[in-house]
């Protein structure tokens, strides 16, 4: 296998197979970013005299050709080439000869991989941001549309107090605001440039790291070269925590949908085409989509812990285990994209039961309303509470009043406009 670090002694096939693993497959996601990082690097090398203007022009043209092949889907990682970074340099050297060999001056594969991963993760977080905003808009629209449709609220899985579909949908919209802050935090952590830190101890070339920071669109360099290398693992863990926050919101919503679709509840309904049947029971309409969202989100949530365990006992500097971060985080990112997409798709077909509370089963939802009505009429709260409790126990409780929930965040005052303003502010990154 062709390796950048080959010194004339080949690794045995079994060692190569064990250490490389799935890295070649996962690296394909980084190909575009390797070219972007390399273009910035060679522009900097020309500015400090390590490349001539002519060499820069040739290398840039060669990298542009590689970028075009990546975009077209024709880029190939050859069987005997170790990784994407090696493949790019090999292609340039084949085309340009010795000029292609100069591209690696002033950097290590350590900072090369770091910058590729950070650029990739920045794009991934921006994509998740857009998907969260789309889902947020869907939930807010459903909240406004169904704001007057009442449903039971539960505590301890027991009938508690009146809620509404407007409140239910709106709650998950507001939860996404918190998730958006988590995504922003992760973005800020990774939005620093490691290029030029080399293997973790800098370089004797007069590298202009501020220049590559500007060219690559990072907010600042990772100033200390050792700290730059220490960001490996921490960056991935922050991203895993952020998408885990999104996953936790989706997981809880999916669990609600599984329960509310059950005929014992009958709160929501989806077309038969979005449910599955049973091989033996002809009446079944199973919530498989929501069960899979629930399960996949649990898998996403596990990524942060896996990354923490992987990176918890290493001294500073590069270690080969860091390669395994991609095995954990890249699939989790794919899952969060898919779960956000299918959740929004399913919500386009949701139907709500507008007559849930016609069932006398839910009459005890209104005990607090009756207690409050008596308190407003002058009865001390503890006396009113005891009176209503006795009526419930004796089967005499009935509520014939009106719901009057007007405070901020209640079923009569959902504050969806204010929540939309919070999201607009939270998404400004």
Image (cartoon, helix red, strand yellow):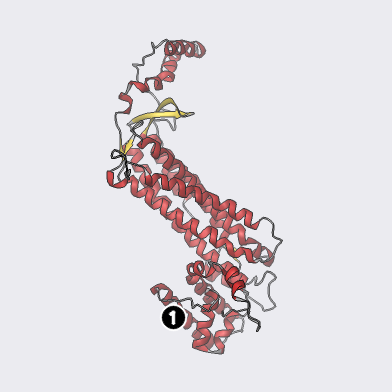
Is residue 425 visible to us here?
A: no
Quadrant containing the N terminus is: bottom right
Please indicate whether residue 347 sits to the left or right of residue 240 in the image. left
Residue most extreme to the front:
280
In the image shown, does 102 or 302 lie closer to the viewer?
A: 302
The relative height of residue 67 versus residue 122 in the rendered view (above or below) is below
Q: Residue at x 39, y 32 (%)?
A: 413
Please indicate whether residue 369 sits to the left or right of residue 111 in the image. left
Q: Secondary structure at mark 1?
A: helix
Residue most extreme to the right:
315
**Residue 248 locus on image (x, y percent):** 49, 45
Which residue position holds label 1?
65
The crowd level at tag 1 (other Cα within 10 Å; few <14, some 14-19, many 20+) is some
Is residue 102 visible to us here?
A: yes
Q: Give the image quarter of residue 391.
A: top left
**Residue 27 locus on image (x, y percent):** 51, 69
In the image shown, does 297 or 88 lie closer to the viewer?
A: 297
Q: Residue at x 69, y 60 (%)?
A: 314
Q: Give the image quarter of residue 315.
A: bottom right
Please indicate whether residue 195 sits to the left or right of residue 249 in the image. right
Q: Residue at x 66, y 66 (%)?
A: 318
Total marks shown come to: 1
**Residue 53 locus on image (x, y percent):** 54, 86
**Residue 368 locus on image (x, y percent):** 44, 20
């Amino acid at each position: 296998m062709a390796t950048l670090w080959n010194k004339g002694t080949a690794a045995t096939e079994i060692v190569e197979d064990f250490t490389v693993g799935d890295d070649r497959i996962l690296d394909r996601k980084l190909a575009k970013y390797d070219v972007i990082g390399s273009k910035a690097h060679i522009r900097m090398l020309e500015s400090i005299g390590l490349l001539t203007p002519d060499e820069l022009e040739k290398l840039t043209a060669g990298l542009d050709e590689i970028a075009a092949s990546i975009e077209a889907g024709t880029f190939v990682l050859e069987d005997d080439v170790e990784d994407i970074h090696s493949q790019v340099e090999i292609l340039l050297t084949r085309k340009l000869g010795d000029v292609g060999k100069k591209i690696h001056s002033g950097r290590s594969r350590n900072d090369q991989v770091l910058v590729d991963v950070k650029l990739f993760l920045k794009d991934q977080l921006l994509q998740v941001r857009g998907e969260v905003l789309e889902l947020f808009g869907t939930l807010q629209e459903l909240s406004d549309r169904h704001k007057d449709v009442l449903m039971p609220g539960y505590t301890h899985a027991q009938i508690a107090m009146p809620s509404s579909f407007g409140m239910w949908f709106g709650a998950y919209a507001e939860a996404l605001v918190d998730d958006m802050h988590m995504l922003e935090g992760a973005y800020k952590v990774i939005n620093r440039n490691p290029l030029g830190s080399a293997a973790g101890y800098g370089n004797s070339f007069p590298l202009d790291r501020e220049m590559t920071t500007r060219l690559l669109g990072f907010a600042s360099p990772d100033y200390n070269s050792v700290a730059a290398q220490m960001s490996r693992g921490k960056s991935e863990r922050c991203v895993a925590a952020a998408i885990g926050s999104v996953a936790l919101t989706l997981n809880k919503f999916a669990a609600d949908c599984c329960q509310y679709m059950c005929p014992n509840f009958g709160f929501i309904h989806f077309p038969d085409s979005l449910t599955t049947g049973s091989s033996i029971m002809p009446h079944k309409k199973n919530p498989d989509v929501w069960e899979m969202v629930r399960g996949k989100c649990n898998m996403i949530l596990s990524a942060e812990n896996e990354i923490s365990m992987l990176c918890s006992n290493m001294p500073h500097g590069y270690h080969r285990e860091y390669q395994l971060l991609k095995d954990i985080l890249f699939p989790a990112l794919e899952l969060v994209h898919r779960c956000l997409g299918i959740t929004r798709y399913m919500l386009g077909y949701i139907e709500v039961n507008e007559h849930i509370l016609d069932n006398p089963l839910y009459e005890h939802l209104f005990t607090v309303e009756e207690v409050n009505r008596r308190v407003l009429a002058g009865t001390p709260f503890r006396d009113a509470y005891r009176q209503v409790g006795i009526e419930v126990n004796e089967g005499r409780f009935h509520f014939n009043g009106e719901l009057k929930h007007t405070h901020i965040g209640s079923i009569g005052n959902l504050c969806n406009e204010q929540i939309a303003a919070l999201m607009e502010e939270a998404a400004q990154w």
